[in-house]
Amino acid sequence: MQYVGRLLKLAISTEHISYYAGSKLLTLLYDLVRTNANLAVMAGYILNNLALDKRFKQQIRDKMDDILPSFENLLKDNSSVLHVLPSCISTMMNLCYDPNIRLKILNRNDMWKANVDLLVIHKDKLKEPVSIELVEACLGMLANLTYEPSQNMKEFSLPICKNCLELCSKFKHYKLIVQRAFTILGHILPHSIPTVDWFCENAGHELLLYCIKNEEELEENKKSALKGLAGCTQINDQARIFIVDHKGLGTLVKSIKSCDESVIGNAALCLGHCTQIPKVCAALTKTDIMKDLLVLARDGKRPQLQKNCAILIAKLAQGDTRHLEKLRELHGIEILHSCMNYIKTS
């Protein structure tokens, strides 16, 4: 206890971190969390302090392969002190801010499996406060890991999305859990065809559209849901038809006027995918969408946004001659030519 007390003082004053071998220190602390209830809280506090220190992260970059098994065992071991586990998972998320460490964590299959297994166990125990914290922490970690595509994301995308869909559907009163679950769906669905097929077969696209249309929903959740819906409509005709049949086009057109370029880009993607459904292009002639898209294609700050808008303009013009006439009237062909040249050189 006296030794750990000394470590706690040093963790608060991070200039002393170099006195200890970083990898051995982290391994020791993870073992303490597993085996000693009295020291678990103190060990968790030290872990969080260390993970926030930039020099410490640099020190352990090349030693993560020695450290990570201890953390993975911590997640797997039922004897661990549960109320400290969320703090330990937060520690690993803080370490992920270092790109080199994040890459090593991203490539560890056992890390993904341990997080998913822990999520599965505790999502069925949400009446217990510690399980709420653990599910929040696991989802936070998975949101971090799924931020960019990887081989492990492909492998675990289906079980992760199954759990996220259940959480968003059944546990709406757990705000942070739902927010993180939507974030993960937004990360995964644009990159996993098998997962999208399962997701839409189980009415996941309906949940996403409902979220986007719900005026009381958090904007962050709407943003993630729209990104996920763009992934669904890219490959799933059922999702496209549902949007058209349930007045989703108006919601997407409204999203084109958003101040958030990410929202605009994904709304344009969704609408572009929906143009494959008969009469969609004709229905959109009753809106000012062509004018809005031309402004965005010309003035948008992100090349990807400009590209998405330009593609939607082309699909609308091909789908209904009235859009083509409007495009010519607004000198849109010249604007498109100019912005496409810019996109190619960006």
Image (tube, rainbow, N blue to C red):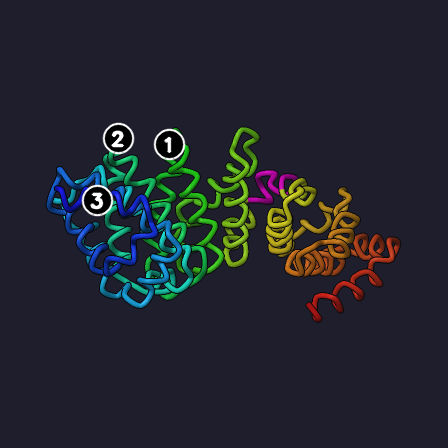
Quick check: marks 1 and 2 in contact, CB under 8 Å? no
Q: Badge 1: few (under 14), some or many (20 or more) residues near its Cα, within 10 Å?
A: some
Secondary element at tag 2: helix
Q: In which quarter of the image is the C terminus?
A: bottom right
Q: Badge 3: few (under 14), some or many (20 or more) residues near its Cα, within 10 Å?
A: many
Q: Position of residue 213 (x, y in %)?
A: 56, 35
Mark 1 vs mark 2: which is more N-terminal? 2
Secondary element at tag 1: loop
Q: Nearer the viewer, residue 160 or 108?
A: 108
Residue highlighted by disc 1: 174
Total numbered circles: 3
Q: Which residue is drawn at 27% across and 47% down?
A: 10
Three-letter code, disc 1: Tyr
Q: Is residue 313 magenta?
A: no
Q: Residue at x 31, y 68 (%)?
A: 62
Three-letter code, disc 3: Ala
Q: Is the magenta stretch mostly helix, strand or loop?
A: helix
Three-letter code, disc 2: Pro
Q: Quadrant of residue 86?
A: top left
Q: What stretch is highlighted in magenta?
A: 243-251
Secondary element at tag 3: helix
Instruction: Tell me the number on the disc at residue 129.
Output: 2
Q: Where is residue 200 in the image (x, y as percent from the top left)?
A: 44, 49
Alpha carbon of mark 1 to alpha carbon of mark 2: how far?
11 Å
Mark 1 vs mark 3: which is more N-terminal? 3
Residue highlighted by disc 3: 43
Q: Which of marks 1 and 3 is in front?
A: 3
Alpha carbon of mark 3 to alpha carbon of mark 2: how far?
21 Å
Alpha carbon of mark 1 to alpha carbon of mark 3: how far?
28 Å
